[in-house]
């Protein structure tokens, strides 16, 4: 039996937003919180999360200085996602776990669809084939002005002494398009996608995320 047929019983939560909005910070705290509440949680991230995903990530980073065709970038993202779904997401959902992913498919709509201007229809074509019915149940989009988020991301990279990632090298206009891409998704799917402003202290942002996740989980238990 191929994995897309696995029956889903779990819950799929994703965290999204442009670089430096605080996804990874909030993600770690949310995962801890859900575990403390007694949920079986599978914490994961894109485009890593699997060995193949890490290799794809290496290709994306290596091609930073060369021009990677936007469609090649999109196809690589969905290649990593196919592996991630098969190895991590679908098996965990089938076991009834709460899967929490630091980025997932909305990132492709925002980054490749809006940022790289490939458009929704092209991304959706990949998404239908690769993700199919395995879509996030709840998505938190952390929203912040790219001017601020990029500064945060740069500070983080300086502290880690690492080079900037592929998209961090892109300008403000690119990140503004990505941000608008996320906000457009949230407008189109207000039930699934919740926008949380992240221009405030970490604890405040976390409190709102916990409230939204708690509300969602309460609805699912009924
Ligand atoms: N609410 C916040 N206010 C100020 N700085 C923050 C906040 N949330 C995260 N940061 C800092 O901003 C940087 C980027 O956060 P991170 O969680 O790595 O973002 P992302 O995963 O979205 O790129 C980190 O140095 C982090 O400590
Ligand atoms: Mg991160």
Image (cartoon, helix red, strand yellow):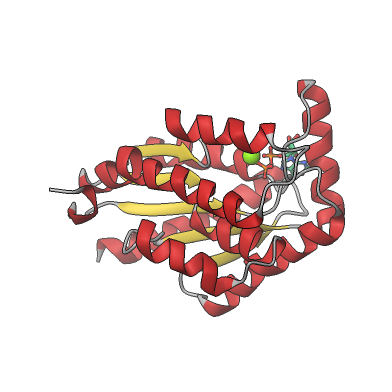
Q: Quadrant of residue 166?
A: top right
Q: Is residue 25 visible?
A: no
Q: Is residue 90 left or right of residue 101?
A: left
**Is residue 75 placed above or below 152 in the rendered structure?**
below
Q: Position of residue 149 (x, y in %)?
A: 79, 49
Which residue occupies the foreground of this view, 72 or 57? 72
Q: Position of residue 65 (x, y in %)?
A: 78, 37
Give the residue displayed 77% in from the left and 57% down from the top: 175
**Is residue 55 placed above or below 220 in the rendered structure?**
above
Q: Quadrant of residue 22?
A: top right
Outermost residue to the left = 1
Which residue occupies the foreground of this view, 26 or 182? 182
Q: Quadrant of ligand 2?
A: top right
Outermost residue to the top = 161
Report the number of discs: 0
Q: Position of residue 139 (x, y in %)?
A: 50, 60
Q: Is residue 153 left or right of residue 9?
A: right
**Is residue 202 placed above or below 220 in the rendered structure?**
above
Q: Position of residue 113 (x, y in %)?
A: 62, 65
Q: Is residue 29 visible?
A: yes
Quarter that holds the C terminus:
bottom left
Give the residue displayed 46% in from the left and 56% down from the top: 213
Give the residue displayed 58% in from the left and 51% down from the top: 72
């Amino acid at each position: 039996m191929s994995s897309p047929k696995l029956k889903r019983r779990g819950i799929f939560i994703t965290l999204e937003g442009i670089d430096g909005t605080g996804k990874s910070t909030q993600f770690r705290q949310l995962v801890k919180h859900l575990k403390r509440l007694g949920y079986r949680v599978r914490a994961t991230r894109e485009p890593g999360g699997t060995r193949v995903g890490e290799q794809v990530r290496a290709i994306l980073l290596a091609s930073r200085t060369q021009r990677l065709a936007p469609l090649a970038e999109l196809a690589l993202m969905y290649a990593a996602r196919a592996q991630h779904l098969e190895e991590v997401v679908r098996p965990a959902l089938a076991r009834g776990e709460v899967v929490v992913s630091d980025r997932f498919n909305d990132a492709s709509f925002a980054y490749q669809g809006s940022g790289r201007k490939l458009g929704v229809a092209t991304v959706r074509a990949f998404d239908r084939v690769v993700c199919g019915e395995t879509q996030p149940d709840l998505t938190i989009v952390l929203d912040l002005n790219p001017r601020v988020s990029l500064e945060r991301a740069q500070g983080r990279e300086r502290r880690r002494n690492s080079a900037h990632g592929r998209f961090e090298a892109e300008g403000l206009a690119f990140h503004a398009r990505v941000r608008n891409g996320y906000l457009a998704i949230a407008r189109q799917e207000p039930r699934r996608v919740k926008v949380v402003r992240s221009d405030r202290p970490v604890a405040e942002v976390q409190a709102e995320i916990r409230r939204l996740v708690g509300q969602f989980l309460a609805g699912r238990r009924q």
